[in-house]
C-alpha cells in the first residue's frame, strides 16, 4: 500500500518535468531569437551543431555573406529546438563545402597564427 509521501513524490515528478520543459522552451526561444538576429544581419544563415561534452552543444552559424558566429545551448535538445524555431537549415558536418563559405578577416588570421608569424600572443594563464 502506498503512503501519502509516495503519492506526493509521484505528483511532484510531472510538475518538475513540466517546469524543466518550460525552461528548455524559454532557452530555445532566446537562442532562436539570437539566431534570427544573426541571419537578418548576414542575409540568411545555415548552421551545424557540435557536441561539446558537459559544456553543451555549440550552434555554429554561417551567414550568406560569409560572416560566422556561434552560440552555446545547454543540451543538444535545446540546440535542435532553437534551430527548428529559427528555421535554421542544419548541416550534419562542418565539411569543406560548408566551411568554404566562411569569410575570415585580419583578426581571425592573426589569432589563428598567434606568435608563429607575429600575431598576438594568447594571454598568460
Image (cartoon, grey):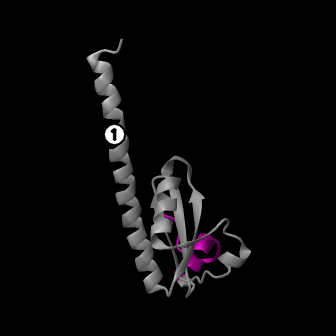
Which residue is at the front of the view, 1 or 60?
Answer: 1
Task: Pinpoint residue 89: horizontal percent, then vertical percent.
Answer: 57, 73
Name the residue rendered at 34%, 59% in the picture.
26
Residue located at (36% from left, 65% from top): 30
Please state, as top left, top right, bottom left or bottom right, where the N terminus lies in the image: top left
Residue 108: say if magenta.
Answer: yes
Name the residue tied to disc 1: 16
Q: Nearer the viewer, residue 75 or 11?
A: 11
Q: Position of residue 62 (x, y in %)?
A: 56, 77
- Callout 1 crowding tier (Cα within 10 Å): few <14, some 14–19, many ≥20: few
Residue 76 in view in this figure: yes
Q: Name the foreground residue: 102 vs 61.
A: 61
x, y percent for residue 63: 54, 81
Residue furthest right in the image? 96
Q: Residue furthest front?
A: 1
Say which quarter of the image contains residue 93. Answer: bottom right
Q: Could you tell whether 68 is left or right of 36 in the image?
A: right
Residue under the point 62% across and 73% down: 113
Residue 92 x/y as whole percent: 66, 65
Splitting the image into 4 quarters, where does residue 102 fall?
Answer: bottom right
Which residue range is magenta in the image?
107-125
Residue 56 appears left or right of 26: right
In the image, residue 66 lies in the stretch drawn in magenta: no
- In the image, residue 63 above or below residue 10: below
Q: Is residue 95 left or right of residue 69?
A: right
**What residue is rendered at 49% in x and 85% in y?**
42
Give the vertical position of 67 relative to 80 (above or below).
below
In the orientation shown, which residue stands out farthest toward the top?
1
Answer whether residue 125 is visible to the viewer in this image. no
Question: SS for tag 1?
Answer: helix
**Residue 102, placed above or below residue 21:** below
Amino acid at each position: 500500500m502506498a503512503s501519502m509521501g509516495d503519492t506526493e513524490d509521484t505528483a511532484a515528478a510531472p510538475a518538475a518535468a513540466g517546469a524543466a520543459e518550460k525552461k528548455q522552451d524559454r532557452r530555445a526561444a532566446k537562442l532562436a531569437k539570437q539566431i534570427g538576429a544573426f541571419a537578418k544581419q548576414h542575409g540568411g544563415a545555415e548552421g551545424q551543431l557540435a557536441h561539446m561534452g558537459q559544456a553543451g552543444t555549440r550552434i555554429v552559424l554561417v551567414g550568406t555573406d560569409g560572416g560566422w558566429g556561434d552560440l552555446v545551448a545547454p543540451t543538444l535538445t535545446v540546440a535542435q529546438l532553437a534551430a527548428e524555431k529559427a528555421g535554421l537549415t542544419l548541416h550534419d558536418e562542418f565539411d569543406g563545402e560548408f566551411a568554404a563559405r566562411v569569410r575570415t578577416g585580419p583578426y581571425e588570421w592573426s589569432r589563428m597564427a598567434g606568435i608563429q608569424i607575429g600575431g598576438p600572443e594568447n594571454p598568460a594563464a
